[in-house]
Image: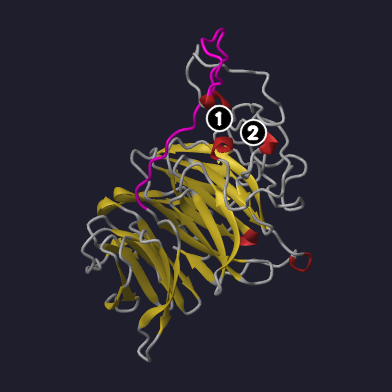
């Protein structure tokens, strides 16, 4: 299976952007309002001056950005320069976006601009962009979900993109137009997505919904206790990590009863939040801070990995390595250290913030790239095995799910409900190459 979804848990709060008020008709002071200079004064009238005669090359107001727009205007996409190609000094809908100050600090984005409230315009010292990289471009932002996106699936051969949210809905998007074709009320929060063949599986509280996109059949698979945060499919078996710490297993059955429950995998003491499969092993990450390794033939636990000091949020198999991330602000690379195949930590990468999700793809030269979604509202991209930085993605809220697809496409879903489509740029020598599938994200 080439496309799987990153697994995550609960959201993180963030304050909303400030708003402008109209200029007061009168003031009682000769002092200029410092909050007005920053675009944050909410008093009308204000007893300090809102002096419109200030130098225009220092402060000038930008229209409030009300919504996202697909990046399909002229000059966008892979053929355009990717550095700040989604940038804009005006939040007004429909305005073209150009990078007018390429010398800005590359590590920080202007949060006032993200809220449509930057008053400094071109003089702002911070990025006015949703990303910074020379390797990929923003294609479109799909707005529709009212709460965080926790599942993304692009079934093989399908022209439809599926997304699920904590708002209790699943949306089906047309891959050619970017429009939402259908909204399905699920009646509960979505915890995760995965797909295999014609089947799309949706993890929800106390149940899993299964859709067959070819014949339209749907099933409610009961058995989980609490929210299902992680799922995987392998060897004609469906695995689901439940809130009570159990990993439930269903084997393929008859056409009348396609999912038959097998014995659950027990061992974790708290909820399962991440699963991935590789090298005939199932790997599970838990709130109990451990990773367990399960043999797919015997369905027995063959090793427990201890090393993280907080929740193991996501897992990824890369060649013979297992990569894990945690709220303890580390990414750990586990390698085979013994003849029996036991894993030990080979390298630990440190971040300044907790890490929520992992995914991986190959660049145009065949080099593996790791995507790390952090709880500071960024996604960081690193080339493996050196962890050389390849770019950053910025979001209004933390990105909770990552997904990759053939052709250099990848997707991010954030806690505000925004689904964003990105395109890894091909070099001239690899325009017709197919994306390798040696990395699979959980």
276 vs 154, nearest the viewer:
276
**What residue is pinned by disc 1?**
38
Closer to the N terminus: mark 1 or mark 2? 1
Q: Quadrant of residue 110?
A: top right
- Circle 1 packing at 10 Å, graded few (<14), some (14-19), many (20+), is some
Q: Toward the viewer: 35 or 435?
A: 35
Residue 49 higher or lower than 68, as above or below: above
Q: Is residue 198 left or right of residue 296?
A: right
Residue 313 at x, y = what percent?
37, 60
- Residue found 68% across the figure and 19% down from its top: 53
Residue count near mark 2 (Cα–Cα under 10 Å), binned few <14, some 14–19, many ≥20: many
The magenta segment is 9-33
Q: Measuring 54% from the left and 69% from the top, which residue is drawn there?
A: 387
Residue at the far front in the pictured view: 30
Judging depth in this view, the residue of 163 and 26 nearest the camera is: 26
Query: Disc 1 on helix, strand or loop?
Result: loop
Secondary structure beneath label 2: loop
Magenta stretch holds residue 31? yes
- Residue drawn at point x = 46 percent, y = 57 percent: 5
Whether residue 336 is in magenta: the answer is no
Q: Which residue is mark 2?
A: 120
- Marks 1/2: CA–CA distance: 9 Å
């Amino acid at each position: 299976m080439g496309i799987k979804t990153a697994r995550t848990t609960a959201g993180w709060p963030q304050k909303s952007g400030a708003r402008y008020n109209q200029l007061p008709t009168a003031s009682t002071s000769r002092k200029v309002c410092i909050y007005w200079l920053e675009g944050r004064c909410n008093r009308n009238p204000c007893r300090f001056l809102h002096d419109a005669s200030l130098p225009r090359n220092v402060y000038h107001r930008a229209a409030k950005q009300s919504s996202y727009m697909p990046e399909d205007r002229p000059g966008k996409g892979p053929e355009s320069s990717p550095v700040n190609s989604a940038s804009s000094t005006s939040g007004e809908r429909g305005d073209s976006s150009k990078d007018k100050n390429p010398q800005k600090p590359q590590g920080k984005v202007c949060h006032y601009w993200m809220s449509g409230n930057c008053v400094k315009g071109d003089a702002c010292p911070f990025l006015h962009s949703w990303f910074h990289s020379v390797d990929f471009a923003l294609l479109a932002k799909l707005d529709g979900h009212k709460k965080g996106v926790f599942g993304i699936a692009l079934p093989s051969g399908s022209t439809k993109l599926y997304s699920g949210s904590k708002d209790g809905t699943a949306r089906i998007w047309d891959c050619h137009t970017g429009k939402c074709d259908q909204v399905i009320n699920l009646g509960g929060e979505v915890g995760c997505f995965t797909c295999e063949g014609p089947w799309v599986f949706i993890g929800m509280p106390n149940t899993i919904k299964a859709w067959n996109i070819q014949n339209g059949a749907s099933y409610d698979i009961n058995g989980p206790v609490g929210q299902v945060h992680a799922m995987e499919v392998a060897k004609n078996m469906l695995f689901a990590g439940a809130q009570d710490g159990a990993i439930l297993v269903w084997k393929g059955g008859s056409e009348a009863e396609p999912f038959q429950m097998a014995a659950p995998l027990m061992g974790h003491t708290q909820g399962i939040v991440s699963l991935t499969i590789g090298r005939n092993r199932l790997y599970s990450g838990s709130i109990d801070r451990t990773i367990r390794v399960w043999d797919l033939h015997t369905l027995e636990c063959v090793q427990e990995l201890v090393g993280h000091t907080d929740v193991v949020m996501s897992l990824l198999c890369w060649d013979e390595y297992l990569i894990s991330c945690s709220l303890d602000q580390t990414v750990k690379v586990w390698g085979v250290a013994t003849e029996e195949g036991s894993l030990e930590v080979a390298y630990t990468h440190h971040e300044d913030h907790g890490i929520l999700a992992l995914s991986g793809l190959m660049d145009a030269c065949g080099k593996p790239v790791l995507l790390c979604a952090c709880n500071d509202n960024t996604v960081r991209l690193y080339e493996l095995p050196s962890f050389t930085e390849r770019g950053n993605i910025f979001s209004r809220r933390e990105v909770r799910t990552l997904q990759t697809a053939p052709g250099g496409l990848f997707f991010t879903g954030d806690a505000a409900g925004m689904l964003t489509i990105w395109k890894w740029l091909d070099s001239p020598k690899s325009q017709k190459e197919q994306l390798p599938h040696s990395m699979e994200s959980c």
